[in-house]
Image: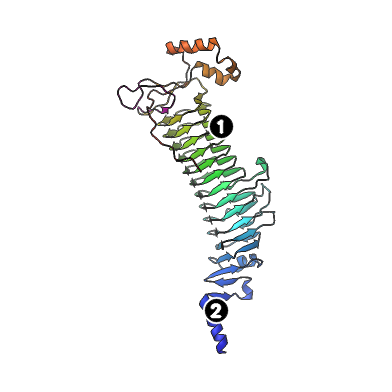
Amino acid sequence: MALRRAALAAVLATGLVIAPAAAGAGTTRGGERVVAPGEPIQPLLDALPPGATIRLAQGRHVGPLRIERPLALLGEAGAVLAGPGTGSVVVVSAPDVRIEGLEITGSGLDTPAMDSAILLTQAAVRARVRSNRLVDNLFGVYVHGAAASVIENNLISGRRDLRLPEAGNGVAIWNAPGAQVIGNAIRHGRDGIFVKTSSHNVFANNTFDELRFAIHYMYTNDSRIVGNRSRGNHVGWAIMYSDRLEIRDNVSDGDRDHGLMLNSTNRSQVVGNVVRGGREKCVFVYAANDNLLKDNWFEGCPIGIHFTAGSERNTITGNAFVGNRNQVKYVGTRYLDWVHEGRGNYWSDNPAFDLDGDGIADRPYRPNDVVDAILWTLPAAKVLVNSPAVQMVRWAQARFPALYPGGVVDSAPLMRPVTVPPPVLP
C-alpha cells in the first residue's frame, strides 16, 4: 500500500494523469489533453467541454477533424496533422477557436467545396490561426464569413503541381468583417490573399512569393493594406472595385505585370509604397477616382504609371518616378496637372534648373508628346519612331507648345525625391 501511495504521489508531482477511458484517448498534462500519434482525436473534440485545450504530440496524426465548440487545438514541435486528400483537414464551426503550432497537409482539390487546410465557417467568429505550417493544400485558410478572425505568423505553401486556374489561394476571405491577416509568409498557388465582399479588414506585414496576385481585392471597403512585401509575382497589389482603402508602406520587387493596380478603386490613400524592377508597369490606374497617390517610389519599369479609362479627381503628388523607360503612359484627351498645393513629383529624366533654390524646377515637366499619344493608340506606328517626319513633329512641338496634346503635365516638379526606398528584399 505504501508503495502504491508513493507511486501515485510521483505521478501527481509530474502533472501527468492518465485520462479516464470514458473521456477518450490522450493523457492530461498541466490541464491540457495530450494526444499521441495514432490515438483518435475526434472523440476528444466531441467530448471535452468548451474552453478545453488539446495538444498533439510530435509525430503524424490523422485527420480530418471537426471543431464544433470553443477550444484550443495546439501542436508540439514536429506535430503533423494529415488529411486524406479529400475535403478540408480542419473544419471549424464554433466561435473563439484557436489553432496553433501545427503542420497541416493533405486537403482535397475541390474548389467549390473550399477544400482547405483550415476552413473557418460563418460560425467560427474570432478564430485565431497562429504559427502553423500549412503545406500542399488547395487553400491554406478559407475564412468563409468568420468575422473578426486573425490569421497570424503562419507559413502557407500551396500546391506546385496544379495549373494556375486550378490552384487555390493562401488565404481566402469572403464576407468576414474585421478579419486580419498579419505576418504570414505565403508562396505558391493562385493568390496570396483573396478577399471578396468584405469590409474593415487588415492585411499587414505579410510576404508573398511565386503567386499570381500577392493581394487581390474585390468589393471590399474601409480596409488597410500596410507593410506587405511582394516579390516575383504576376501582380503585387490588385485592388479592384473597392473604396476607402489605406494602401501604405508596401513593397513590390520584380513583379511581372504590375506592382500596383487600381481598377475602379475610389476614395483611397496610396502612400509611401515602393514598386521597382517590374517587367511591365509599376502602377496601373484604370477607372479609379478621387484617390490620393502620395510619396510613393516607382522605379525601373518599362512604364512608370499607366493612367487611363477616364480616371478623374486623383491627387498625385510627391511621388518619385525613377529610371522608368516611359515615365507616364496616359490614354486620354484631358489636361491633367499632377501637382497639389504647389508640390509636384520627382522625375529622374527631367533636366531641370532651380535658380531660386526652392526645390521646385523652374519649368513644368511634360512626360509625353503627340508622338507618344499616337504610339499608345497605334502601336504599329513604332516602326516610324526614328523617321524624319516624327523628328519634325517633335521639333515643332518644342518651339510651339500649343501643339502639345492634352495629357499629363507637372507644373511644379520636384528637384529631388522626398522618399528613400527600403532595402531590396533578400
Where is 87 relative to 423, above or below?
below
Q: Is residue 92 visible?
A: no
Q: Which residue range is magenta in the image?
A: 342-362
**Circle 1: element type:** loop
- Which of 144 and 237 lies nearest the eye of the viewer? 237
> Disc number at residue 279?
1
In the picture of the structure, the residue carrying the numbered disc 2 is 11
Locate the N terminus by quadrant: bottom right
Q: Quadrant of residue 389?
A: top right
Residue 105 falls left or right of residue 367 = right
Instruction: Looking at the image, tell me whether mark 1 or mark 2 is earlier in sequence order.
Output: 2
CA gap, disc 1 and disc 2: 65 Å
Under mark 2, the amino acid is Val
Residue 167 lies, in percent from the top left, at 65, 44
Q: Is residue 115 left or right of residue 176?
A: right
Residue farthest toward the bottom in the current orientation of the protein? 1
**Towards the viewer: 173 or 394:** 394
In the displayed structure, 276 sits above or below 190; it is above
